[in-house]
Image (cartoon, rainbow, N blue to C red):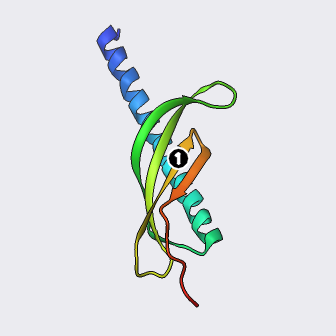
Amino acid sequence: MLSLSVVMFLAIAAFVFAFWWQSDKIKRLTVAYVRRYCRQRGLQLLDQTTVLRGIWLGRDEEGFLQVGRRYQFEFSTTGEQRYSGGISLLGTKLIAVQTEAYALPSD
């Protein structure tokens, strides 16, 4: 028979694993959002990655509690200068993409 402490440990371990698994899925989704954003604007996504900068709890449009995440990424217009951007998601829904002001390449 399992003791209460073993059951609690297993429950916490299962929660941590599930959170990690979902976070990995969200990160891959975030990179896809950023790639599409950059492609549509003629920007180059640098390093092909995003970096987690924050996590919070928020409610979606239906009122359900969701985990919000903010990621940072870097991009370039010409390949010479790096600019920063940020992307926010609530659950799997894209909330916002922000970029710092960047110079457009001269033709």
Instruction: Identify the residue at horizontal 55%, vertical 73% (top origin).
Output: 43
Q: Which one is in front, 8 or 69? A: 69
Q: Residue reaching furthest right?
A: 62
Q: Which amino acid does label 1 sit on?
A: Ser
Q: Residue reaching furthest bottom?
A: 107
Q: Residue 36 at what x, y percent from top left?
A: 62, 64
Instruction: Identify the residue at horizontal 33%, vertical 9% (top origin).
Output: 4
**On the rendered image, what quadrant is the C terminus found in?**
bottom right
Instruction: Identify the residue at horizontal 42%, vertical 28% (top origin).
Output: 14
Q: Say if 82 sits above or below 70 in the image.
A: below
Q: Which one is in front, 52 or 43? A: 43
Q: Say if 67 sits above or below 39 in the image.
A: above
Q: Mark 1 falls on what kind of element? A: strand
Q: Which one is in front, 18 or 96? A: 96
Q: Which one is in front, 57 or 99? A: 99
Instruction: Identify the residue at horizontal 62%, vertical 71% (top origin).
Output: 41
Q: Residue 45 at what x, y percent from top left?
A: 49, 69
Q: Residue 21 at what x, y percent from top left?
A: 46, 41
Q: Determine which residue is flagged by label 1.
A: 88
Q: Residue 103 at what x, y percent from top left?
A: 50, 76
